[in-house]
C-alpha cells in the first residue's frame, strides 16, 4: 500500500521497548568518573565511591572453593579489582538507568579455573551472594541494574527480570572477605572507571 512505511520486526520491538521505559529513565545518563556516558558492552572497573573501605570488585575463594567464584571487594583500596563488561541485551550504544544488565568479569589471563572469556554474575538464591555462573547458567537477559544513588551509583539485583529490585552491598565474613550480597537498604556506592584509562584515579572521597 502506498504511503505506509513498514518497519522490520526487530526495529518495531526496539521501539516498543523504548516506549515501555519511564520517561525519567530515558532522560538520565550513566556516567563514568570522567563524565563520559557508559557504553553498552564497555569494560569498567567498579570502584567504591568512598576511600577507606576496600577497593574494586574482583573474585575470591570462599567457603572451601577450589577456584575463585565469589564476587568480593578487594581488601586494599589501591586495588582496582577485575575489569567488568556491562551490557544490556538491546544492543544500543549507551546504558541508562532502568535497563536490565548483564555484568561479567573478563579475566586478564586464562587459567585452569577460568578458561572462559567472560565470567557472568549471578545471585545464589539461598545465600543471596553474587557468584560466577556456570556455562549452563548463562542468561540472555541480565537481572542487574545500575541506579543513581546520592551523588554516585548503586548496583541492584532484580528478581525474574522484573522491577522488584534489591540493593547490592558488602557483607564481611569470618575470613574477612568483603562479599557482594543482596543487602537491601544498605548499598555499596560505586563509580565506574574505564578499564583502559591511563593513570591513577584518585577521585574517591575519604571517609
Image (spheres, helix red, strand yellow):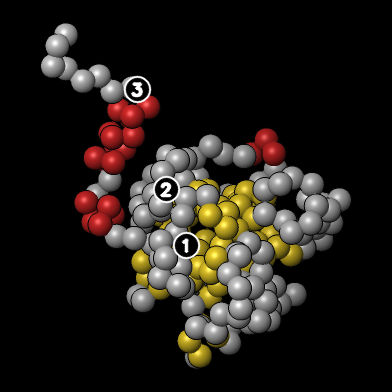
Q: Residue at x 24, y 40 (%)?
A: 19
Q: Residue at x 52, y 50 (%)?
A: 41
Disc number at residue 155? 1
Q: Is 95 above or below relative to 49?
A: above
Q: Residue at x 70, y 63 (%)?
A: 59
State the residue position of label 3. 9
Identify which residue, 158 or 146, lies in the foreground: 146
Closer to the camera: disc 1 or disc 2? 2
Q: Position of residue 142 (x, y in %)?
A: 50, 45
Instruction: State the quadrant of the N terminus.
Output: top left
User: Between disc 3 and disc 1, whose residue precedes?
Assistant: 3
Q: Is 171 above or below relative to 97?
A: below
Identify which residue, 35 or 141, lies in the foreground: 35
User: Between disc 1 and disc 2, whose residue precedes?
Assistant: 2
The answer to the question of whether label 1 and label 2 lie on touching residues, with beta carbons closer than 8 A, is no
Disc number at residue 93? 2
In this rendering, does residue 180 appear at all? Answer: no
Q: Position of residue 95 (x, y in %)?
A: 41, 53
Amino acid at each position: 500500500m502506498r504511503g505506509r512505511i513498514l518497519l522490520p520486526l526487530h526495529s518495531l520491538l526496539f521501539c516498543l521497548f523504548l516506549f515501555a521505559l519511564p520517561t525519567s529513565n530515558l532522560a538520565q545518563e550513566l556516567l563514568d568518573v570522567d563524565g563520559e556516558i557508559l557504553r553498552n558492552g564497555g569494560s569498567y572497573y567498579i570502584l567504591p565511591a568512598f576511600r577507606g573501605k576496600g577497593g574494586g570488585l574482583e573474585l575470591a575463594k570462599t567457603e572451601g572453593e577450589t577456584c575463585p567464584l565469589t564476587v568480593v571487594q578487594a581488601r586494599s583500596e589501591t586495588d582496582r579489582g577485575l575489569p567488568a563488561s556491562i551490557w544490556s541485551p538491546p544492543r544500543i550504544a549507551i546504558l541508562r538507568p532502568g535497563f536490565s544488565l548483564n555484568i561479567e568479569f573478563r579475566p586478564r589471563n586464562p587459567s585452569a579455573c577460568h578458561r572462559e572469556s567472560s565470567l557472568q554474575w549471578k545471585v545464589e538464591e539461598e545465600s543471596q551472594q553474587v557468584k560466577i555462573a556456570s556455562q549452563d547458567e548463562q542468561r540472555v537477559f541480565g537481572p542487574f541494574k545500575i541506579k543513581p544513588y546520592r551523588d554516585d551509583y548503586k548496583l541492584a539485583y532484580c528478581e525474574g527480570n522484573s522491577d522488584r529490585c534489591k540493593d547490592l552491598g558488602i557483607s564481611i565474613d569470618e575470613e574477612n572477605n568483603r562479599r557482594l550480597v543482596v543487602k537491601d537498604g544498605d548499598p555499596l556506592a560505586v563509580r565506574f572507571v574505564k578499564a583502559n584509562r591511563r593513570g591513577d584515579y584518585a577521585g574517591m572521597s575519604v571517609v
